[in-house]
C-alpha cells in the first residue's frame, strides 16, 4: 500500500508556507529502501530506477509538510512515500516526506482535541472552531443558519480562482471564504491557490472540514464549516470544493465529487442559497467529461436533494447549445439560471494565479473556467 524509500536531501527548492520542497537522491537498490513487509520487493522501482542501475540512486522532488515532519535540510536522511509519484498522478508529482528520522521536530504543544487524518501514522491534532476549547465555540453552539449566504459548490479545486474572479467582477468588496472538503488533498497547505488568493486579499481564508486540515479554521463537518465561514470569518460568499486532486474511477458513482451534492444539501438545510457550478469542458478527451461532466449531472441530479440555482454559462455555438441541453436534464430538481460570460475572461486573466484544470490552462479549456466564473457572478448577484 505504501512504497517506502529512503533518500538524502541534496538541494532545497522554492517552497511555500507550510510546505518545504527539496531534491532528494533516492536509493533504489533492492533491499536498500525501507521495506516494512521485509520482502525487499522494491527493486524494480518504476518511475525512479535508472536503466541498468542496480545499487544506483536517482533524484526526485520531495514534499514535506513542515507542521507534520519539520523542515528538511541538505544532507538529511528522509523516509519517503513514493506511491503517488510512481503512479504518475497529476497532483501527486512528488515523493512525500514521512519523517526526517535523524532530526525529529520538537514537540509543539498546541490547543485542540480534533484529530484529523485519524488513525493514520500522520494523524494531526488541531483546534476545531466548533470544539469546547475554542473561542468560537459559543458562537457556533448557538448558530443554526447562514442567513441566506450564497454558497457556490464546485467539483474541482481548480474552479476556486475562477469562481472568485466571477464574484469580484460584480462585487469587488465581497468577503469570500473557501470551505475545503476532504475528497482531495487533506492538508490545505498543498493548495498554492488558497495561499496566493489569501495573501492577495481575494479570499478571507479557508475552513478545512472533515478529514482535511490546516485551514485558517478547522471544522468537523461541511455544515459547521459553513457556519464558521459565516459567523466567525464574516463571509458574504462561501465557495465549497475539494482540496487539490480528486478521485474518480470512470464509474457512475465512484468519484469523490459526489460530495458536491451533499454540500448543496448542507447549504440548503442551513438556510443558505446553494449555487451549483457546472463542471464543463470543451477539451477533455474523455467523453463523460465533455460538455457538462457526468460528475455534475450525478452530484446535482441525483445526490442533491435540495433545490439549487444551477448556473448555465451562455457559451457560443454548438458547444454552448450542448451545455444548455445537458443542463436542462437538471431542470426538474433545480432552478436553471443562464448567466452571460462577457468580461469574465478578463477577470480571470487579472487573477494573481494562472488557472489550470487537469493540466489545461485558459487557452486550452476556456469553457471550464468561464463556467466557474459565471457561478461566481450569479452568487454576487444574490448579495
Image: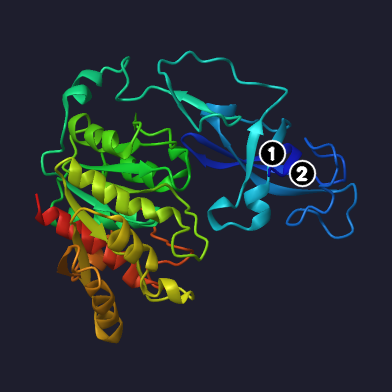
Image x and y of residue 10, in percent = 72, 39
| Looking at the image, residue 383 lies above or below residue 349 | above
Q: Quadrant of the N terminus?
A: top right
The residue tagged 1 is: 80
Q: Image quarter for residue 98?
A: top right
Image x and y of residue 108, in percent = 51, 15
> Residue at image x 32%, y 66%?
297
- Crowdedness near tag 1: few (<14), some (14–19) or many (≥20) residues, C-alpha within 10 Å: many
Q: Image quarter for residue 200?
A: top left
The residue tagged 2 is: 26
Q: Is residue 166 visible?
A: no
Q: Is residue 271 visible?
A: yes
> Residue at image x 16%, y 32%?
144
**Of helix, strand and loop, which one carries label 1?**
strand
**Mark 1 vs 2: CB contact within 8 A:** yes
> Residue at image x 38%, y 22%?
127
Measure the alpha-carbon separation of dots 1 and 2: 9 Å
Amino acid at each position: 500500500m505504501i512504497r517506502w524509500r529512503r533518500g538524502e536531501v541534496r538541494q532545497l527548492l522554492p517552497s511555500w508556507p507550510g510546505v518545504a520542497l527539496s531534491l532528494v537522491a533516492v536509493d533504489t537498490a533492492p533491499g536498500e529502501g525501507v521495506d516494512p513487509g521485509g520482502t525487499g520487493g522494491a527493486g524494480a522501482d518504476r518511475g525512479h530506477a535508472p536503466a541498468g542501475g542496480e545499487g544506483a540512486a536517482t533524484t526526485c522532488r520531495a514534499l514535506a509538510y513542515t507542521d507534520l515532519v519539520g523542515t528538511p535540510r541538505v544532507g538529511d536522511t528522509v523516509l519517503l512515500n513514493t506511491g503517488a509519484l510512481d503512479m504518475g498522478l497529476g497532483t501527486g508529482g512528488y515523493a512525500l516526506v514521512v519523517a526526517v528520522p535523524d532530526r525529529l521536530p520538537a514537540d509543539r504543544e498546541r490547543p485542540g482535541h480534533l484529530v484529523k487524518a485519524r488513525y493514520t501514522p500522520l494523524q494531526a491534532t488541531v483546534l476545531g472552531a466548533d470544539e469546547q476549547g475554542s473561542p468560537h465555540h459559543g458562537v457556533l453552539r448557538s448558530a443554526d443558519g447562514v442567513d441566506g449566504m450564497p454558497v457556490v459548490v464546485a467539483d474541482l479545486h481548480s474552479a476556486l480562482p475562477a469562481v472568485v474572479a466571477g464574484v469580484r467582477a460584480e462585487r469587488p468588496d465581497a468577503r469570500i471564504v473557501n470551505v475545503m472538503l476532504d475528497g482531495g488533498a487533506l492538508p490545505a497547505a498543498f493548495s498554492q491557490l488558497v495561499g496566493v488568493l489569501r495573501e492577495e486579499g481575494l479570499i478571507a481564508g479557508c475552513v478545512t472540514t472533515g478529514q482535511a486540515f490546516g485551514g485558517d479554521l478547522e471544522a468537523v463537518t461541511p455544515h459547521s464549516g459553513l457556519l464558521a465561514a459565516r459567523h466567525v470569518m464574516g463571509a458574504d460568499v462561501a465557495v465549497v470544493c475539494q482540496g487539490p486532486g480528486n478521485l474518480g474511477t470512470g464509474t457512475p458513482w465512484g468519484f469523490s465529487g459526489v460530495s458536491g451534492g451533499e454540500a448543496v444539501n448542507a447549504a440548503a438545510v442551513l438556510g443558505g442559497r446553494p449555487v451549483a457550478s457546472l463542471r464543463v469542458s470543451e477539451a477533455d478527451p474523455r467523453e463523460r467529461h465533455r460538455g457538462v461532466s457526468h460528475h455534475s449531472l450525478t452530484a446535482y441530479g441525483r445526490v442533491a436533494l435540495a433545490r439549487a440555482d444551477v448556473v448555465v454559462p451562455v457559451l457560443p455555438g454548438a458547444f454552448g447549445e450542448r451545455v444548455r441541453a445537458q443542463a436542462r436534464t437538471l431542470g426538474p430538481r433545480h432552478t436553471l439560471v443562464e448567466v452571460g460570460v462577457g468580461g469574465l475572461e478578463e477577470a480571470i486573466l487579472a487573477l494573481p494565479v494562472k488557472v489550470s484544470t487537469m493540466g489545461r490552462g485558459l487557452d486550452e479549456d476556456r469553457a471550464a473556467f468561464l463556467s466557474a466564473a459565471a457561478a461566481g457572478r450569479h452568487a454576487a448577484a444574490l448579495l
